[in-house]
Image (cartoon, rainbow, N blue to C red):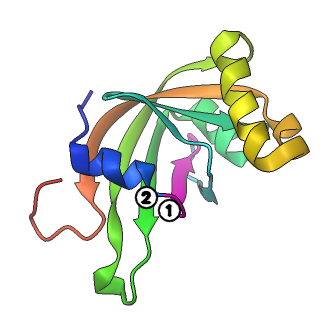
């Protein structure tokens, strides 16, 4: 596990950021999807609510994922953000944390939250800048 930096925490707190999660199944077939419901649980853990979709199917077969957090700039080289490499720690299909997360999503998206069936808890493996020029993040 990796402890995230203050800069990564800052990126995760920006309203209007894009969160793009990449997963692959056991055969290596990939999926990319955007999510708004990522939540930093602590400095080594993130959570995401999912429905029964391709992302969840892939994570059941292969626990590794990569999250791209994007703050668009005027040009590609002005784009800010980070890459967060994740590994599934556990999945909850009910309980207090599940209910609180789902209520938070419901407040943002309304009845679309009814599609959410799983709270996926990830260990943060490592982080990198979105444009890696050797700088630390």
Question: How would you rate the neighbour count of disc 1 (Cα within 10 Å): few for under 14, some for 14-19, many for 20 or more?
Answer: some
Q: Earlier in the sequence, mark 2 or mark 1?
A: 1
Query: Is 19 colored magenta in this rendering?
Result: yes
Q: Is residue 136 left or right of residue 8?
A: left
Where residue 89 appears, as percent x and y from the top left, is 47, 21
Quarter containing the N terminus: top left
Q: Secondary structure at mark 1?
A: loop
Question: Quick one: which residue is furthest to the bottom in this view?
Answer: 75
As rendered, which of 7 and 53 lies closer to the eye? 7
Q: At 76% from the left edge and 40% from the top edge, which residue is drawn?
A: 107
Could you say which disc has been placed on residue 85 in the image?
Answer: none
Where residue 43 appears, as percent x and y from the top left, is 31, 29
Could you say which disc has been placed on residue 17 in the image?
Answer: 1
Residue behind mark 2: 69
Q: At 24% from the left edge and 51% from the top edge, which residue is drawn?
A: 7
Q: Secondary structure at mark 2?
A: strand
As rendered, which of 68 and 102 lies closer to the eye? 102
Residue range corresponding to the magenta coloring: 15-26
Q: Is residue 112 left or right of residue 46?
A: right
């Amino acid at each position: 596990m990796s402890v995230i930096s203050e800069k990564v925490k800052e990126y995760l707190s920006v309203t209007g950021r894009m969160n793009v999660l990449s997963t692959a199944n056991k055969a290596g077939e990939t999926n990319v999807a955007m999510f708004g419901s990522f939540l930093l649980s602590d400095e080594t853990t993130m959570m995401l609510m999912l429905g029964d979709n391709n992302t969840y199917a892939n994570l059941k077969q292969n626990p590794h994922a990569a999250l791209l957090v994007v703050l668009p700039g005027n040009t590609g080289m002005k784009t800010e953000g980070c890459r967060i490499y994740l590994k599934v720690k556990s999945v909850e299909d009910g309980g207090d944390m599940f209910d609180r997360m789902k209520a938070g999503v419901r407040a943002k998206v309304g009845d679309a939250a009814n599609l959410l069936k799983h709270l996926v808890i990830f260990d943060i493996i490592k982080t990198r800048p979105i444009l890696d020029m050797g700088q630390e993040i």
